[in-house]
Image: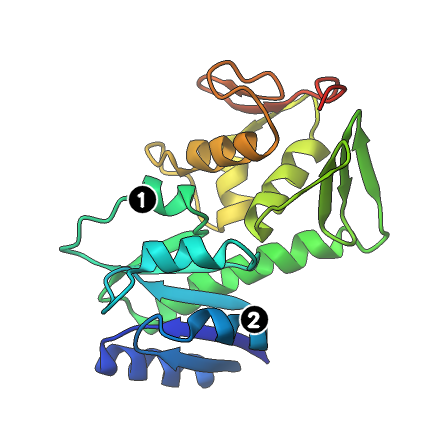
């Protein structure tokens, strides 16, 4: 049974979501706001966290930023249609996906399962404990740890899976359609720029040049290119 934490102040919506997810083999803990969230995540190590954006007290963006200091699992935002939700900001601070309220519970469940399948699927491929080494960059698939030189790089589960996908296809272009299908669990619509935001965040953590990236390059109109021989320096 997967463990999930839902932070939602709408009592009716929260109750509906909790009942539906619990009927689909999730153990759900619900909070009406961010009070006690950090402690609860550290105590229970949930598989997924869902955050409403607009909450009493600290908002979802603030809470996400705090969680990403230590929580690497899937994190999903829920946002109301009339909110000025900034998808780029959400992704930059570490969210894996978002849904717009009012959301049908079955749609939410599909999004959650897509995130979990991605983690499980990519994790199963690493069962042999293989380590990929590119100069000073080491990617340990079994322990899901990344080091650059002597420094441990803290990545979310989504960032780690993105890096593995790119590194597995080193020196080849990975198109956006593949990224969306394998990492997000839905088809690329030709307009969504979230893949660029995710890659940009990964570059920052791996000391790539944001203005002129040379380690993970963007090939305009095609996709992204992991340069296998660009990791000699730290």
Q: Residue 67's spot in the image, x, y percent? A: 48, 59
Q: Residue 64's spot in the image, x, y percent? A: 41, 56
101 relative to 31 in the view: left or right: left
Res. 24 in view: no
Find residue 42 and name its label: 2
SS at mark 2?
Answer: helix
Please name whichever residue, 211 or 223, is drawn nearer the observer in this view of the structure. 211
Q: Depth-wise, is mark 1 or mark 2 nearer the camera?
A: 2
How far separated are the C-alphas under marks 1 and 2?
26 Å
Who's the residue at 44% across and 19% down the image?
221
Seen in the picture, residue 33 relative to 135 is either above or below; the reply is below
Res. 41 in view: yes
**What residue is disc 1 on?**
87
Who's the residue at 80% across and 24% down the image?
135
Quadrant of the drawing holding the N terminus: bottom right
SS at mark 1?
Answer: helix
Please name whichever residue, 170 or 58, is drawn nearer the observer in this view of the structure. 58
Q: Residue 9's spot in the image, x, y percent? A: 25, 75
Quadrant of the drawing holding the C terminus: top right
Please name whichever residue, 145 or 39, is drawn nearer the observer in this view of the structure. 39
140 relative to 13 in the view: left or right: right
């Amino acid at each position: 049974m997967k463990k999930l934490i839902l932070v939602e102040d709408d009592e009716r919506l929260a109750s509906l979501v909790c009942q539906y997810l619990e009927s689909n083999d999730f153990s759900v803990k619900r909070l009406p706001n961010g009070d006690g969230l950090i402690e609860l995540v550290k105590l229970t190590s949930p598989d997924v966290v869902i955050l409403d954006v607009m909450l009493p007290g600290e908002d979802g963006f603030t809470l996400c930023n705090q969680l990403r200091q230590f929580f690497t699992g899937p994190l999903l935002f829920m946002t109301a249609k009339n909110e000025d939700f900034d998808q780029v900001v959400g992704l930059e601070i570490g969210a894996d996906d978002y849904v717009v309220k009012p959301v049908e519970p079955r749609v939410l469940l599909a999004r959650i399962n897509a995130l979990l399948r991605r983690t499980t699927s990519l994790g199963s491929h690493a069962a042999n404990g293989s380590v990929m080494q590119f100069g000073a960059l080491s990617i340990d698939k079994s322990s899901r740890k990344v080091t650059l030189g002597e420094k441990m790089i803290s990545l979310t589960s989504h960032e780690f899976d993105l890096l593995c996908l790119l590194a597995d296809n080193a020196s080849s272009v990975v198109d956006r359609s593949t990224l969306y299908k394998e990492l997000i669990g839905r088809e690329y619509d030709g307009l969504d720029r979230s893949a660029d935001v995710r890659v940009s965040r990964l570059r920052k953590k791996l000391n790539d040049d944001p203005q002129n990236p040379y380690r993970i390059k963007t090939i305009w109109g095609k996709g992204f290119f992991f340069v296998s021989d660009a990791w000699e320096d730290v």
